[in-house]
Amino acid sequence: MFFSKQAGDAHQSASELVSVSLKTLVDLARPAASLNLQHALIRSAQSGGYVSRFKGRGMEFDEARLYQPGDDIRSIDWRVTARTGKPHTKLFREERERPIFISVDNRAAMHFATRGVFKSVLAAKLAGLLAWTAQHHGDRIGGQIFSDTACRELKPQNGKHAVLRFLNALVQPAERTADALTLEHVLARLAQHARPGSRVYIISDFRGLNEKAEKHLLKLSQHCDVVLIMVYDPLESALPVKGRYRFTDEERDVVVDADSSAAVQYQQRFAQRQQRLGQLAQSRGLAFMQCGTDEDPVQRLRYLLGHR
């Protein structure tokens, strides 16, 4: 639901505020060139400065050769050794392209804003910027787009076509595949699909985060670099203390009487979810950042990731 439109948004059409077009995501290729995902450290904008040290790129099997004195016995290729009758050693090479996996929340609660753009629009723009930036660095791009009733995974591939495939998935509604999907279910799927050594970005408002969902996040972090990007609307962090407010999705109208006690409780729930994510990131070495619906995603990522 959209609550109000700020005067500063007058230059944007209503459709641009509530939905994102493929052209808009394609046009992000240029500003994405100024971003850098290769920093060893990403610091949270939250107080406390959570720091996540990203691991190096994965190793990929290259070939097997005859064992030579000094080779690590842990690298012996036992299958080739058994087949040939002579000891062989596995040789590995560093992967030149790192898999980038971007998970994007498109649930009903993401289609909301009181300022700027819908959370879903902001999430798509952040995902597009990250995808283009990864492509500029020669990384492979894949991802996951999920709603309340559908979840789709895209295997990481390289090149511009991989980005366009991902952007198309962001703007096309997925077919219903389940009666109901929770954040717990989505993260369980993500832990299964993200390849070890990948960098995984999860862009969501993280509603429904519980202990089971956290376990899947921790499992994911054991073999991937995980970045949590929390998107939110300013109204979620602090409700007006008192008054009557009209909410609409252009089909239905809802009038809410806000009182001081309800506002405090609402603000506390948001703060608890925010704090829970921050503590999880701090304790497990995950990167954690936030972006409001009234903020410029390009400037926000540039600030958080640093200049090239």
Image (cartoon, grey):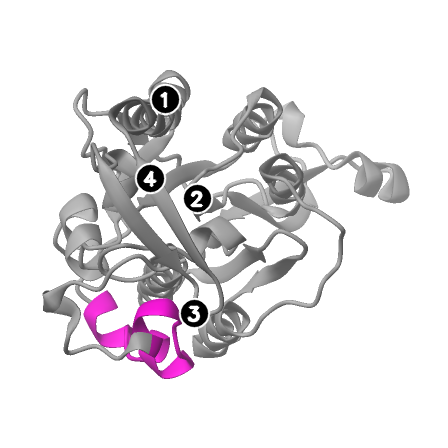
Q: CA distance from mark 2 to mark 3?
A: 48 Å
Residue shown at 67% from the left, 39% from the top = 185
* Membership of 82 in magenta stretch: no
- Going by the numbered disc 4, the residue's amino acid type is Asp
| Label 2 SS | loop
- Going by the numbered disc 2, the residue's amino acid type is Arg
Residue indicated by mark 3: 250
Which residues are drawn in magenta? 15-32
Callout 2 crowding tier (Cα within 10 Å): few <14, some 14–19, many ≥20: some
Q: Earlier in the sequence, mark 4 or mark 1?
A: 4
Residue indicated by mark 1: 272
Residue indicated by mark 4: 257
Q: Position of residue 256 (x, y in %)?
A: 36, 44
- Mark number, residue 33: none
Q: Earlier in the sequence, mark 1 or mark 3?
A: 3
- Going by the numbered disc 1, the residue's amino acid type is Gln
Q: CA distance from mark 4 to mark 2?
A: 53 Å
User: Mark 4 near mark 3, Cβ–Cβ under 8 Å?
Assistant: no
Residue in the foreground of this view, choosing between 110 and 286? 110
Where, by quadrant of the figure, is residue 288 drawn?
Answer: top left
Residue indicated by mark 2: 57
Q: Position of residue 247 (x, y in %)?
A: 37, 55
> Which mark is in front, 2 or 1?
1
